[in-house]
Structure formats: structure tokens, C-alpha cells
Image (spheres, coloured by chain):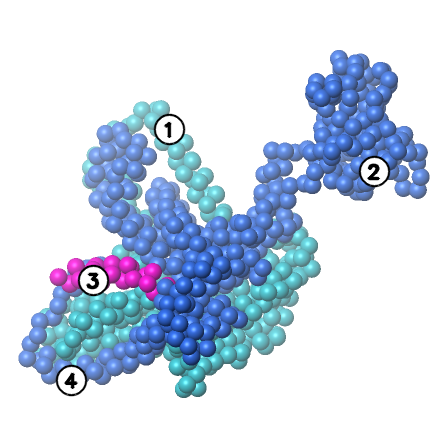
Amino acid sequence: MRTPTRPRSSGAALRRRGLAPVFLLPALALLGALVLYPIGWSVVRSLYDAPGTGFVGLGNYRTAFTDDATLTALRNSAIWVAVAPALVTGLGLVFAVLTEKVRWGTAFRLLVFMPMAISFLAAGITFRLVYEQDPARGVLNAAAVAVHDTFDPDPSYPGARPRPGGPATTSGGAVRAAPAPPGTAVAVPLVGLKPAALPAAAKPAAAPAAGAQGGVHGTVWLDVTPGGGTPGTIDPGERGLPGVTVRLLDGQRTVATATTAADGSFAFPGHPSGTVDLPAANFAAPYRGLAWLGPGLVTPAIIGAYLWIWAGFAMVVIAGGLANLPRETLEAARMDGAGEWQIFRRITVPQLAPVLGVVLVTMVINVMKIFDLVFVVAPGPVQQDAGVLALRLWLVSFGGGNDQGLGSALGVLLLLLVVPAMVLNVRRFRRSTR
Amino acid sequence: MTQLLTRPAPGRSAGSARPPRPRLAARIAARTRGGAVQAVLLVAAALWLMPTVGLLLTSLRPKEDSAASGWWTVLAHPARLTLDNYTALLGGGEVLGAFWNTVLISVPATALTVALAALAGYAFAWLEFPGRDWLFLVVVCLLVVPVQIGLVPVARLLGAIGLFGTVPGVVLFHVAYGLPFAVFLLRNQFLEIPQEIMEAARIDGCGEWRVFRRLALPLALPALASLAIFQFLWVWNDMLVALVFAGSDSQPLTVLLQSQMRQFGSNLDVLAPGAFLSLLVPVAVFFSCQRYFVQGAMAGSVK
């Protein structure tokens, strides 16, 4: 901000004195009636009970710090203030520095800055779609499942169980095959799955190839034939379960593991005896991603959406500061062989400190008043878990609570929280006029 | 401060001799680092673009499709995209009415804020009156006052004069809470006008009103534009104020859509196109006026 120069008083200025009220009156009247008066009214009202008839002193403030929902809101607001501004500023700084180094930096800045023009409501609806829990519909969980399955590609068969009365039994979620005489195949017939649930790669079930039959061997298959078949034997058309992890146990000790082939066969060459065991993990429910909007993750999830909206603001303001930095120091450091990281940490960040401070303070003030995004993104049942001060204020005063005493107390608290920013602004203003 | 979205000149000082050619290893290292930067920014760009693309594609899918699968599946079957949701939405009347309310609230709230703030800002900058500095200090204090504190008392006040639940009521609230920043910004802007020019105009016998209209306003035009854009977007995007002060026949788009959030999931054919419609205007304003938008963002970092 440039230093404004004060106009000196002159004779002509005296004549203009009469005009001032005409220029000022509309703005000051509105400010007085709709901003200043409400502050005073709220302070007084916060000392009265819900209907506004009984004086309760600081009772509403005591309620604010003891009532569960309000305490949750205060705690969440504290998390927001501690986490969100730092993340926004940090990300903005990284983007501002990186975009200087690529040719399409301007296009990138436009793209990241754009969400700032969007309403919290539209952004909220957008992120409800992103955070949708069903991986078939929510893009974030779809990505999470894709990543998870890349690292753990074995299919699982939830619901599969050994054929009752068959040669295999369950033990604590795992499936244990009955011992078979040495040299014969171990049969693990399973039921409880629809044939359509098998992966497309599954082939008709078969015993392992003759060469592999030197040790314990056998087949895991879906022992279901529509309209008949012989239980416990591999009928034509019955398919094997591929990708099942099979352990060979000697007592309690695992001596070997194998994975079934596309036809469901497995073999432990060189192990003439042992118990065949299919661990419970084979039958666990598949990974379905995270409950982003559940009570545990809802606040971090909404902070993520907030980051999407505001990182561009931080980036643009910081980039403005970056453009005004003297380039000589950077050049000198580069010539002296300093690495990019060193330059960033030792030169860029310290020089940018004032701008970073302004962005951080702006974001703190902004975060304290956050309301719309939480209101829209948090689904009804978890709204209390996600609650923040401004949302609580609205719920208490208008959204069913109808307690304007407590609502006013929360409003006064909110105002008290921004007083440091007020003092900062006044000091900055005083400095600039001196 | 005007060209923030354009890159500053790359880190070479003009006129100086080319730096000596770095050694091969250093060049390769620099090249891979450049590649890494590109990759990081590409991933970030994809992340930033994806939510909006998801919203747009969802808004173009039949309800049954959205209930069954994610929007990305449509990329394999582009023929399933349809404008039906939009035609149904705009044919329904309710959304059009809310859209119209949004315009009826945003335009006067912007115009009034800019007009009143220009008058007051001019008075604080160039007119003399007792207590001027103290009064302006109050305005500076009001910069950060949260709108939440005004909700209950102003609702009662507007109720007393019969404006609660009407468009003018919402407008008045927006103007009042937009004023501190607007007055602050414009007063500083008017002070930038050199004293000599002001005095010359006054000595030429121009009345104060003429000086304001013919000299001060045109000179402050860029600031007026940034202010107008920011205030317009702020009011257009607002939900909280309208949620409290608007009635069912004066509610803007944000409030109408918000009332649908409870059934989220089963009504994506309304919510997704509605949200996209509501962000179309601000994004259009953003792209056509990005220069002023950036200036406003810089100036706004005191609010």
C-alpha cells in the first residue's frame, strides 16, 4: 500500500465543510444502523436468556464453553485456524515459485485461481461429488481403490465358504482342507458365490499338471453347477478360483505358500505332506476406500475443499510479491552455485516474509468466519461433528435452536476473535499515514 | 501490481553477458529438475480441474446414470451425455425465478455499495470536517467485523420496517457490510490524485460536485471496477445472508439449491446443473475481468 498524502487545509477547504455531511450521510447511516448498532445490541443481548426476558449475566458464555456441540465447534474452529491458513499459504508459495519456472505458468495460475470466483455452495456440491463414498461413483475413492488394488492385486471372494459336509472346513475365517493321502489331489470345494462373481480370467477347474504333483497339490473351485452336479467333485463347467493365497502348514508353522492358477489349481512341489489352509484374507470384503464425509474425516475433507478454493488467492498474492523482489541476490546466489532448494529457503522465503504474513493473517480471519462450505459439504448426520463457530451460531439462532441469547454470545466471541486483526489493521493504517 | 498473472521476466538480467555454459552434468540435472517441476504442476493442474469437470459431466448425465456410476465412465460413452437436465431445470420456472432473484440482489447491491462508498471515500480523502480521522479509524476497525454478528439484530430491525424476507432487505445488508472495505479502498484511491490537480480544478471554479464527478471518479475508475467486480461476486455467491434475510419468493439460486442438499444423491439432475448455472456467471466475470480481479484480491488482503 502506498503512503497517502494528506491534503492541507486551505481557505477553500472551509467552504467545503458544509458539503461533507451530504457525501457521508448515506454510508455512515447504513454503517451505524446495520453494523455498529448490531454489535452493541449483540453484546447486551448475549447477557439475556433465550426468550430475551431474563438477565443471565455471563450464563450464555458459560454455556458456550460447556455445551457439547458448541465445544466441538470451538475445537473444530481451532483445528481450522491451526491447519488451513498454513496449508493455503504453503501451497500458494510452492505454486507461485514453481509457476515462474515453466512456460505455461500463466495458464496454470488462471486455472488454480478460478475456484475463487465460485460460490461455496457450488464448490460444496462439487466436493460432495468428489467425496462420494461409493467407489463406483466418488472419484476420490475410485482412485483410492485403484491405487490399493495395484499394490494388492489378488482378488478376494467375500462370502465364499466351504461346501457344508464337504472335505474342507472353516477355522476362524480361514478355510482348512481335509488332509488327503499322499499323492492324491486336495479338494477345496467352495460355495456361497455367484458364478458371475468370479473374475473373467477364471478357467474351468482342473487338477495341477502332472509335473507339479511331486508334493501336496490340489484345486480350489466353485462347486456350483446350475441344476445339479455332484457335490465335492469337479463337474464340467465348474470354474476354479484364481489368485487365492494357499498356505501349507506343518502343525502351526507355515512351510510354504502358493497362489492358485486361473484354473484354481495349486501345488507345493517338494513338500510331500502338510495341511492346506486358505487364510481369511482371501474372503475379506474388498477395499472400498475411506469414509471421507464420516465423523472422523469430515473436517480434513472440508479443509481439502477449502484449499482448492483459496490456494489460488495465496498463489497470486505471493506471485505479486515475488515479482517485486530484487533479482540481484538470486543471481548472485546462483552464480555462487547455490542449489534451488537453498535459494528458496535462504533467500526467497525470508524476502517474501511480509507478503506471507499478510496472506496468513487474511486466511486466519477468513477461516474464523467459515460457514457455507461446512454447511454444504457436511451431510446432515455429521454436521455436528464438523461444526464450526459460525455454523453453530447460525444453527443456534436460526436453524432450529432459536436461542438468540446463546447466538449473540457466539457472535460476540467471533468478534473478539478477530479483534487482534482489527488492531493489526489500525496499526498498519496509523503507520501509513504518519 | 497490474500484471500479476503474467510471469515476471525470467531470472536473467537484461544486457549482461550470457552466463558461461554450465557443465554437461549440471545441464542434465537442470533439465530433469525442469521435468520434475512440469510433472508436479501437471498433476496439480489435473487435480484443480477435475472437480469442476466432474460437476459439468454429472450435470450432463441422466439421473439414473449418475446413481449407477461415476461421471468418468461417461468418457467411454460420450453419447450418453444430454442437455435434458438443463431444459427441465430452466423449464421449471422455480430455478429461473431464483436466478432472476440473484440478479435482482447482486446488481443493486453492487451499484449502491460502489456509489455510497465513492461519496464517502471522496469525503474522507478531500473534504474537511471535524473528527474526520477518528471516523475513518472506525471504518478501518469495521473492516474485519464478521457478518454473523449482524444477523440476529438486523433481522429484527428489518422486520420492524417490513423489509425482512424481501429483496431490498437482502440488498441493504450486503451494502452495509460491503461498505467498510469499499470506503477504505476508494478513500486510499482518491488520495492518490495529486493535490495540484485538485486545487487547479477548484480554483477554476468547479463546484465540489463537479470535481467529484468529472475529475475524481474517472481517475479512480480501475479501483471502482475492481471493487464492483469483487462486490458483485461476493453478493452473487453469498448464501448465508440470503438464507437469513430472503423469503421464499425472494430467495437466490444458492438458497434454492441449498434447500435441495438434504436429498443429495437422489436429485443430482437438479443440483449439478443448478450449481453449474450458478458458477457460470462468476467464472465468466472472472475470465473477462481477471486483471481487475487480481488487483481486488491484492487490495482485499486486509479484509
Q: Where is B167 relative to B187, above or below?
A: below
With A126 as the anchor, is A63 left or right in this view? Answer: left
The picture's colour for chain A is blue
Q: Earlier in the sequence, mark 3 or mark 4?
A: 4
Measure the C-alpha gap from mark 3 to mark 1.
47 Å
The picture places residue A322, in percent across and down from the top left corner, at: 28, 47
Q: Amino acid at mark 2?
A: Val
Q: Residues within 10 Å of mark 3 (few under 14, many from 20)?
A: some
On-image quarter of the C terminus of chain A:
bottom left
> In this figure, which residue is indicated by the disc labeled 4?
A18
- Give the SS element for disc 2: strand
Indicate the position of residue A279 as horizontal and vertical percent values.
72, 30
Q: Is residue B266 left or right of residue B145?
A: right
Residue situated in front as seen by the camera: A72 or A103:
A72
* Left or right, residue B293 beside residue A305: left
- The amino acid beneath tag 3 is Phe
Q: Is residue A315 above or below residue A36?
A: above
Bounds of the magenta segment = A414-434
Residues tagged 1 and 2 counted as in contact (Cβ below 8 A): no
* Residue position for label 1: B29
Foreground mark, 3 or 1, reads 3
Q: Chain of mark 2?
A: A
Which kind of residue does numbered mark 4 sit on?
Gly
| Relative height, residue A215 to residue A191 (above, below) | above
| Residue A429: numbered disc | 3
The residue lying at 24 percent from left, 61 percent from top is A423
Q: Main secondary structure of the magenta part?
A: helix
The residue carrying pointer 1 sits among few (fewer than 14), some (14 to 19) or many (20 or more) residues within 10 Å by Cα, namely few
Read off the residue under disc 2.
A191
